[in-house]
Image (tube, rainbow, N blue to C red):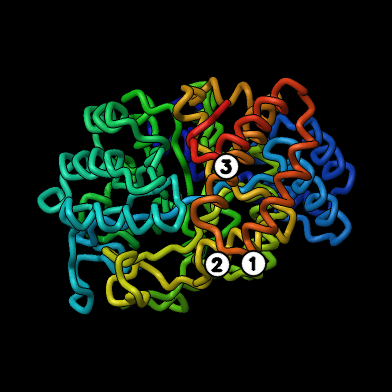
Amino acid sequence: MYDVTSMKAEEFICHEEILESLKYADENKDNIPLIDSIIEKAKLRRGLNHREASVLLACDKPEKIKEIYDLAEQIKKDFYGNRIVMFAPLYLSNYCVNGCVYCPYHAKNRHIPRKKLTMEEVKKEVTALQDMGHKRLAIEAGEDPVNNPIDYILECIDTIYNIKHKNGAIRRVNVNIAATTVENYRKLKEAGIGTYILFQETYHKESYEKLHPTGPKHDYAYHTEAMDRAMEGGIDDVGLGVLFGLELYRYEYCALLMHAEHLEAVHGVGPHTISVPRIKHADDIDPSAFDNSISDEIFCKIAALIRVAVPYTGMIISTRESEEVRKEIIRLGVSQISGGSRTSVGGYCEDERPHDTEQFDVSDQRTLDEVVNWLMREGYIPSFCTACYREGRTGDRFMSLCKSGQILNCCHPNALMTLKEYLMDYAGDDTRAIGEALIEAELKKIPNERVKDICSSNLAKIEQGIRDFRF
């Protein structure tokens, strides 16, 4: 029985409700009056439910898809402006006891060397990331209670926050680790994490259990209910995601929205972020073994419809995707991207990109400076801002500002100031020249004169060597 407020995974992600929604979508994919009414509702910027959004995903009429894309692009601008938040993943350990058949870290993979960073190695990795210009990390580790206990994760977080190198500092650590207990989520909250991220991989229970045949991750309910435990543990911001290509994409899309609806209904706060990874080649993993892979066209359509259905959420895309795909998907809704990423344990300290411990192949292998340069040439402001986390604008406080459009009043100047820091400390000559011109032009767009004056004054102070201003 479907119940959006239930705390049981199989009731708030209800298989029968998903099938009924997909059947309804198939029956109405050519129902133009209904499709138009759903698009009109989406224009109110309050989102769509899983059944309404599934109709739009099923619709294959080019003129309606164009309307959806145009709306997604406008909603993205309304909520997030032309800012793109930058981050990097940091892989701490690839020890893992799970048997996930799509991940090279699975316990039976004997090809991949196992590695776990010591605190000294964490310092070296973080110093290398600071020297690139990064201010926000997402830490990753396999599930292994012996090698990667919560105390190890907490020690790594503490180490990361205490590394100050030249003008570098990691100002926010987001965490992507396995589902855990309320007590452990409280410890992560006390450690000062930003967002807790956990990909569902697939919401289809039967497929989930086949894809996770062994290890603690095999428990579908425990994994799917993790975000409720995280919020019970005091974590305000959680990030959802599925690994597209494991199961039929329309099923996953519908279930993903149901999960967002559940968090909103129970906790009053939907997902802070939604990630859109696709299965990619990696050691011991052949993506062609999974017969639900999706085209670039469908991938972009999914992203646009997440933006339309969940307008307030931050959307994340990684370096799994090529420059061409990232360009299109940023336009349609993505607001956060990684840059200069290495998906191997200890990879940032190596001159050459190591491949033997990579979790997946990286399609976009440009440096952070090349990505920043590219974004600015495309008309975006690369933002290294972490102000909302540090000012307590998380959870319902962030969402109320975001949904009302007020978040732009602080995010836009914060983006300019953190970009200025990057330009002064890390950018190449060409990137700096493009960035200075961009800041000058964007500064004029700040509507509040007082905010504009303060931002202008702070930009001058950054030139003088002072760092870390924020609204």
Label 3 Cα crowd, 10 Å radius (few <14 / some 14-19 / many 20+): some
Where residue 458 appears, as percent x and y from the top left, is 60, 32
CB atoms of marks 2 and 3 within 8 Å:
no
Q: Which residue is mark 2?
A: 321
Dot label at residue 451: none
Instruction: Identify which residue is drawn at 69% across, 67% down.
Output: 297
Where residue 111 appears, as percent x and y from the top left, is 21, 79
**Amino acid beneath label 3:** Glu
- Tell me how many marks there are: 3
Residue 298, picture quadrant: bottom right
CB atoms of marks 1 and 2 within 8 Å:
yes
Where residue 289 appears, as percent x and y from the top left, is 43, 77
- Calculate the distance from the C-alpha at mark 2 to the C-alpha at mark 3: 35 Å
- Calculate the distance from the C-alpha at mark 1 to the C-alpha at mark 2: 6 Å
| First in sequence: mark 2 vs mark 3 | 2
Instruction: Identify which residue is drawn at 54% across, 62% down.
Output: 369
| First in sequence: mark 1 vs mark 3 | 1
* Above or below 418: residue 324: below
Residue 276, picture quadrant: bottom right
Q: Which residue is mark 3?
A: 463
Q: Which residue is mark 1?
A: 325
